[in-house]
Structures are given as structure tokens and as C-alpha cells.
Amino acid sequence: MNATMAAHTFSGMPVSARFDVLPQYFFPKKAITTFAGFVAGNRWGFVTTRIIRWFVRKYGVDMNEAVEPDITRYKTFNDFFTRALKPGARPLADAELICPVDGAISQFGAIDRLHIFQAKGHHYTTTAVVGGDADLAAQFEHGSFATLYLSPKDYHRIHMPCDGRLMRMIYVPGDLFSVNPVTARGVPGLFARNERVVCVFERVDEPGRPFVLILVGATIVGSMATVWHGVVNPPRTGEIREWHYGDLKNDERIVLKKGEEMGRFLLGSTVVMLFPQQPAGRALRFNPLWMPAGAIRLGEEMAREENS
């Protein structure tokens, strides 16, 4: 991006936010990310162990929760980063929707027609974030959303908020800005401009009622993977790619239960969830303890469906 384009993008933003994110417009983000993916995905022996040890100390990673707490047993950095948790480490709440990740809350709440709140002064549309499919986006008009940020220290597998049947998956190419809170305040439409994988499900208990989980990429995020497809990116072709699963026969359908793993980040990022407007007389009530920037854990109550 040249200086004129950057200046236009920054118009209307607070001065501090402009300077905080300005370098990201000029960094070779894709080259850095490709290199990081190469390093994280290969075996480097004692070098890998030293990197993991440094990472654990710097970010305060709790290895006591991991199935394999011994960092010397991880052959690659990605193996460590996507480490499994011990059984029972994240009990599931008795709620219609559970939190699908460990991390922190970026934002959550109502979708204003088709507009999603990102940060003060910034919104993006459901149409943009799902890759331009207006018909899909329309199903979430006046619905609800939650944007959850996974920091480096967090567990980086993503789990199901409820029982769901997979209908579609859409890979949307894009930028690779950081997705930390500072960048969310400074880059307009961040989650709708970064590379992302859009996973469209329907509720098992309410066939035809959709919900969407969007895995948003970022700088250094080497790739994103789902349990049914494996690694989705790379390749980074620069084109939207789509897979359809809704027409599979009954014995071939991909159905995942609440709390079951659905995907993972190979060097973490953000999850955006979209839920449709509730039927008349019903309302989606988010956990009253939730607030922006608050810490969250996989399995805790995210929301309940109640009479309005």
C-alpha cells in the first residue's frame, strides 16, 4: 500500500490509533507469515525445543493442562502450539451455546441489520465477512455475533458451541494484519479484510437454522485447519474457494457435537460467530459475566435462548 492509500484509510481515526497500526500497512505480512509457517511446521531438533521453552516463559503458558506437558516431546512448534488438553480440563456448561475457545472477548452483541461492531468508530458487514454472499449474510440480519481473540498463550483448538451439521466452507483470501486489540481499534473492517475460513452449519436440534464460525487469519498465522478438511491454507491462491457438504447422504454427513473440536489455528488468531435473529417471543441472552476484553474459557456458558 502506498502512502496516499494509507492516509485515506486512516482518515477519521484517532491519531494514536493511526500511528499504532501504520507500520503494518508496509510490512511484508505474507512473506513473514509464510516464513513463520515454514519454521513452525518443520523439525529443528534442539532449536525447536529452545523456541518452545522461550515461548512458554514469555507468555506464561500453563503446560500442566496439556496431555503432553514435556516440551521436549514436541517435534515441531506447531505440534506444541496445537497441543491437546487433558480430558476434563474444560467441562461443558449446561447452556444452549458454550464458548468455543480459550481467549478474550473482543466484542459481542446484536447485529445492527447487517452491521457488526468492531471497535469505537469501526463496523463491518455480515456480507463482507462471509466473503460477499448476500443471501448467506441476509440470514443473520438483526441476529447476534461474538468476536473472540486467541492470544499467544491460549489453547488454539476451536470447538463447537452447539451440535451442528456442516453445510458449507468458504475460504476467503485477504490481508494478514494482526488481530490484537490495538489493531482492531486501528484498522477499519479488520475481520472482513483479513484472510478467513467461513464454516456454515445448521443446528441439529433445529434443521434449517444456520450459524457460522469464521476463523480469521493474521500476521504469523501459518495456516488454519478443520477436522473434516485438514489444512485449508496454504495454498493462498488469491481466489475464493468453496466446498459444499449439505447434499451429502445421511451416512456421509458431517455432524459435530457441542464441545467437539472443529478446527485449529497453526499460530493463533480470532473467531467470529454469527447467529440468526431469534423467533418471535425468544431472545439470545449472552452470559451476564461477559464483557469486552474479559477472559474466557472453552466450555463456559456463552449464551442462552430465553423467552423475551
Image: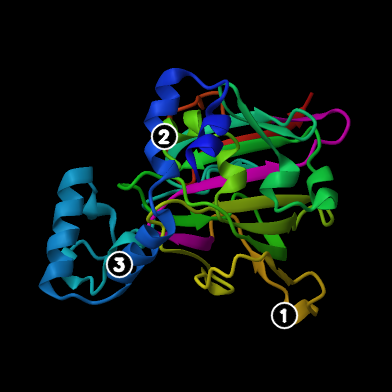
Residues packed near mark 1 inside 10 Å, few (<14), some (14 to 19) or many (20 plus): few
Q: Is residue 235 left or right of residue 84?
A: right
What amino acid does circle 2 point to? Val
Residue 83 visible (yes or no):
no
Where are the magenta residues, as a range? Answer: 261-284
The quadrant in which residue 30 appears is bottom left
What amino acid does circle 3 point to? Ala
Spot occupied by residue 290 in the image (x, y as percentages of width and height): 51, 27
Spot occupied by residue 273 in the image (x, y as percentages of width and height): 63, 45
Q: Earlier in the sequence, mark 1 or mark 2?
A: 2
Spot occupied by residue 153 in the image (x, y as percentages of width and height): 30, 47
Q: Which label is found at residue 40? A: 3
Q: Can you tell which of label 3 and label 2 is closer to the viewer?
A: 2
Placement of 97 over or under 29, stated as above or below? above
Q: Which label is found at residue 252? A: 1
Q: Which residue is mark 2?
A: 21
Element under disc 2: helix
Q: Residue at x 86, y 28 (%)?
A: 281
Assess whether residue 99 is covered by the magenta stretch. Answer: no
